[in-house]
Amino acid sequence: MTYDASTRQVRVRAPGKVNLSLAVGALAPDGYHPLATVFQAVSLYEDLTARPSDTFELTVAGPFAEGVPTDETNLALRAARLLAGHVGIEEGVRLHLNKGVPVAGGMAGGSADAAAALLACDALWQTALSREALAELAAQLGSDVPFALLGHTAIGTGRGHLLTPAMTRGEYHWVFALRAKGLATPAVYRTFDRLSGSTAEAEPQADLELMQALRAGDPAALGAVLRNDLEPAAIELAPELTETLAVAHDAGALGAIVSGSGPTVAALARGAKHALVIAAGLTAAGVADEVLCAVGPVAGARVLQTVRLGGDFEPGPLSPVDRA
Ligand code: C5P
């Protein structure tokens, strides 16, 4: 199948995430752990442009470009190939990624790349897949990819790929303490298995208190109930995280946890100014290689711009979330 190549470029933005709660069950026979998690999308972004090409190519720039593979293992390229195969497109795509989410940091940067690539190629090739069809492809690429498409706040079950959007109020201010040396997600889960022995629950449950805090828009109540079952495993693999967490607490954070599989530490602030105070505390203590402030929740992957033949610039079509 060929497509109408009048679309010359599509620009898409997808967010990173933090898990406000991550309850992890016992390893299942399929090699995954059942989860009950609450995702919040935050304002650290992956920006991706897609242009027509005969082959599949990727270039990477931006603050976290270093160490991103550009071969066929890259999740954005895999997403583009998966969609092409699914709809029968025979051409390729030229992708350019501006990476604003840390690599191997527990913030689902690679998943955001995959979500962005699915959406960008869907628009470039005018495949007009439904939200459900895109989410299904997303789940094949990784457990966190469907959430990067959906954004905002959602409860994730299954591998984390089955999503229920959650009602929340207000804006939450985060400080992220990054470490240059990332953690591999499978290694963190293996360490979780070793540490939890047979004590992990078969069916973890979402935290009702946490959902209540989100509905009330109460950052102090949220800070008190942040939870991550992978935190002890991440600390076992990167013991320096104990100090990062302690400094965040000492700097007055409402709560501080390891984000996802780590090693990023997420500290919740009372507001924008308080976030700067916490960021300064973390920087001064030398317990992070880089410190970033961000807010959540934010939208999932969305088309920012579509450029058609003749140089016409149009506002992007609605994201699959808005379209639904
Ligand atoms: O789904 P994704 O490819 O992101 O998962 C990466 C790895 O993380 C899996 O291979 C598995 O080892 C681990 N994982 C898990 N349970 C989950 C999600 C991921 O054990 N729910």
Image (tube, grey):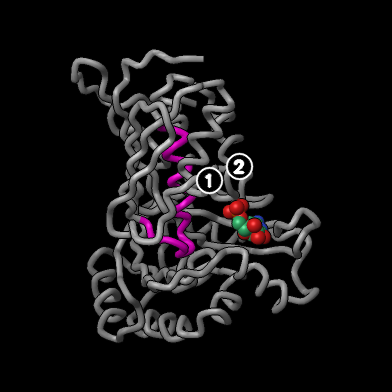
Q: Quadrant of residue 268?
A: bottom left
Please state if 299 lies on the left or on the right of 29 as rendered. left
Q: Secondary structure at mark 2?
A: helix
At a point 40% along the width and 61% down the height, the residue shown is 67
Q: Is mark 1 within 8 Å of ligand 1?
A: yes
Residue 174 x/y as whole percent: 35, 64
Which residue is label 1 attached to? 145
Is 54 situated above or below 3? below
* Residue toward you, 147 or 32: 32
Is 226 situated above or below 132? below
Q: Secondary structure at mark 1?
A: helix
Instruction: Please state which amino acid type lies under the numbered disc 1.
Output: Val
At a point 32% along the width and 54% down the height, the residue shown is 100
Residue 255 x/y as whole percent: 44, 73
Q: Which mark is residue 269?
A: none
At a point 33% along the width and 62% down the height, the residue shown is 173
Which residue is label 2 attached to? 139
Q: Could one spot residue 13 in this view of the protein?
A: yes
Q: Are marks 2 and 1 in contact (CB under 8 Å)?
A: yes
Tell me the CA gap for discs 2 and 1.
6 Å
* Residue toward you, 282 or 290: 290
Is 212 situated above or below 146? below
Region of the chain picked out in magenta, as a range: 101-120
Is the magenta region chiefly helix, strand or loop? helix
Instruction: Please state which amino acid type lies under the numbered disc 2.
Output: Ala
Residue 167 x/y as whole percent: 49, 46
Q: Quadrant of ligand 1?
A: bottom right
Disc 2 crowd, CA 10 A, few/some/many (<14, 14-19, 20+) = some
Is 200 situated above or below 55? below
Residue 274 x/y as whole percent: 27, 71
Q: Which of disc 1 and disc 2 is earlier in sequence?
A: 2
Q: Could one spot residue 167 in this view of the protein?
A: no
